[in-house]
Image (cartoon, helix red, strand yellow):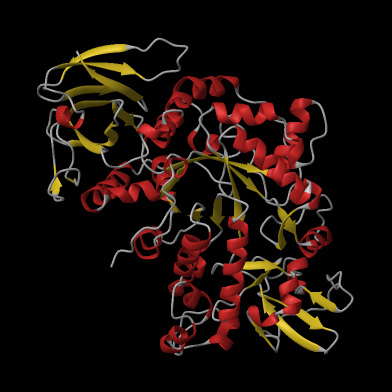
Amino acid sequence: MKKALSHPDAHWARDLVLLAKNTYVWLDQLSHKYGKRIMRLDQIPEAEIADIASRGVTGLWLVGIWQRSPTSRKIKHLCGRPDALASAYSLLSYRTAEELGGEDALVVFREKLAARNLQLACDMVPNHTGMDAAWLFQHPDRYLTIPENPDARFSFDTPNLSDNPADEIYIEKGYYDQSGAAEVFKLVLTKTGEVRYVYHGNDGTSMPWNDTAQLNYLNPATRQALLDEIVKIARKFSIIRLDAAMTLTRKHFKRLWFPSPGSGQFIPTRNHFRMTAQEFDQQMPHEFWEEVIRELSKKSPHTLLIAEAFWLTEHFFINEIGMHRVYNSAFMHQLRDEQNREYRSYLKSILRTDPAMLERFVNFLTTPDEQPAILQFGKSTKYLGACRLLACLPGLPMFGHGQWEGLKEHYGMDIASPAMREEADQKLMSAHERFIRPLLRRRAEFSSAASLRMYDLVQSDGLVNENVFAFSQSSRENSWLILFNNSAAPARGKINTNTAQKMNNGGSGRAEALPLWRNLRLPTAAEIRLLEALDGNQPEKETRVDISSGLALRLGPYESRVYRVSPF
């Protein structure tokens, strides 16, 4: 049964355009750009904030602002990386890092953003903490631990990583010499002499996150503590990105950590946690994320939650959990790999059943965890077409650090400054300014799925060209045509009626198809004007066409067009 969606209904949330920034790298780049040391959030120049806002960006996600784990940094230094920071996802606490200016600097920076109508986003890392977080010593029962070494091959004859004389932390020797990837670390509570082996955070791969400690969501106290932490964060940030949210769904949390008896597929060191489905259900009867949505609707109803969710859980998060926004990795992967038939089929299936789902997606061409967009899509017509779809389709558009400037370096989550001193690609910057910025600044005309229609480009032989993405969109102000040929081959054909789609605006709610002229809200099927959307500094290019029997199109390799449509 589909969950009623509970989410902020303010215009800023509906029309949000998000920009991600690796905080420490950004400050280093700003220091070079402005010729002075910029180390704190409150030192970020207002001119930089104004420039971001001028692009049509309305939300800024600061990656890595929390107080990081000293143990994480110590591990990296012992592994021969003396300049490394602790990982941005190995956290000591949810307080703004002191080296960034602490909570006072955050308040000043947030006020600067608000003056430009920019919302502030942060991460919440619910799956794990740093290995030296206070919880581990004060509430070790909140973590996945066992009293004995789960594998005799694991050796902990290594340096003590704890800065606290009352406790000792030892990471497995194989991590240092790269002979293995241990799943646990040794914790000694020296006051009592108790020894526990604590599992590192993990997403089911063979490489645990070796500077983290895995939280145990079967413990109600753990769930309540995390819920309280999220509520505290929501009071300071209007947008929260939930890291690796899919790992905490009941299905996947059991799969990862609590294998069923008799199951042949589990990681051997987790044999200790074997549990029947009935036992698991008794201890975790409800989805944690349902609890979070319900609690925030009462205590912070204006906070927008974004779930980083993979493993085909996107529909589950939207329809069953009621999550506000969810990563849509298919947008990046299938456009990049030109799996056009598959992505068009995916979009059609959503339009036939529930077009509003498209509004819940977060669409992107890169993320802080992915290779930069310029390495995945290039910087010519293919990138431009994909970026136009990003700007014009329903779903939150998210831009990566350096994407606008065409930067090529992928920044790790534990670096303080980029390895490359790159200059912005002025040609790509100009393309963004001319073709993308005008669309983002009119984002309100594209964010709704209510009037979105999708079309097949039918060739003269009667076959559909699956490489062409064609959409119409209508707002109170304008009607639009969005076209993109995501292929190295030219495309030629005609679009007419939209693909079958569920229509609730005054319709029956059944899957229906209407002619192009009606979807564009034109009075008749006659000659129309197509005005190409460009920067206001450029005159709009006008084309007159007859659509009485559909619209004939010719698109070159990777060619894209965004037209504002009006009667002639």
Residue furthest to the top in view is 539
Q: Is residue 547 visible?
A: yes
- Identify the residue at image location x=13%, y=32%: 515
Residue 538 or residue 370, whichever sits in front: 538
Residue 413 or residue 155, whichever sits in front: 413
Residue 33 or residue 558, whichever sits in front: 33
Relative to 206, residue 148 above or below: below
Q: Quadrant of residue 543?
A: top left
Relative to 5, residue 409 above or below: above
Q: Position of residue 6 (x, y in %)?
A: 40, 58
- Identify the residue at image location x=55%, y=26%: 54
Q: Position of residue 421 (x, y in %)?
A: 73, 32
Relative to 468, residue 250 above or below: below
- Total marks shown come to 0
Q: Position of residue 149 (x, y in %)?
A: 70, 86
| In the image: residue 363, left or right of residue 244 | left
Residue furthest to the right in view is 165
- Identify the residue at image location x=89%, y=76%: 165
Q: Position of residue 414 (x, y in %)?
A: 72, 52
Q: Quadrant of residue 20?
A: top right
Quadrant where the N terminus is found in the figure: bottom left
Q: Is residue 408 visible?
A: no
Quadrant where the C terminus is found in the figure: top left
